[in-house]
Amino acid sequence: MTATREATFKTIPAGTKVTWHYRSAIGHGTVKSVHKKQTNADNTMYSIEQHDHHPREPAIVVHSGKALTRSK
């Protein structure tokens, strides 16, 4: 029998609008999902749908929670 363990921390919920620093700019997007859960919200990786990406840039990027700031 496999025991399930409850998470000891909350992840950033899908649908949360976030920003992050990228080179000399700031990216804007919305959390789509948890990409890879780690030991806390800061080192958990999130899939982010970019709002203002340029052609040839991916529409979805992956960032750690520590790199993300919630926005309005």
Image: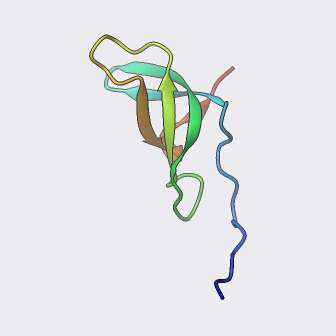
From this viewpoint, which residue is outermost toward the bottom? Answer: 1
Q: Residue at x 58, y 60 (%)?
A: 40
Q: Residue at x 53, y 45 (%)?
A: 65
Q: Is residue 33 above or below residue 60?
A: below
Q: Residue at x 39, y 15 (%)?
A: 53
Residue 59 in the image, given as x and y percentages of width and height: 41, 23
Residue 26 in the image, given as x and y percentages of width and height: 44, 20
Q: Quadrant of the C terminus?
A: top right
The answer to whether residue 70 is left or right of residue 59 is right
Residue 70 in the image, given as x and y percentages of width and height: 64, 31
Examine the image and state in which quarter residue 62 appears: top left
- How many marks can you see? 0
Depth check, front residue: 28 or 5: 5
Depth check, front residue: 66 or 15: 15
Q: Quadrant of the N terminus?
A: bottom right
The answer to whether residue 1 is left or right of residue 63 is right
Residue 6 in the image, given as x and y percentages of width and height: 72, 70
Q: Is residue 24 above or below residue 2?
A: above
Q: Residue at x 50, y 16 (%)?
A: 51
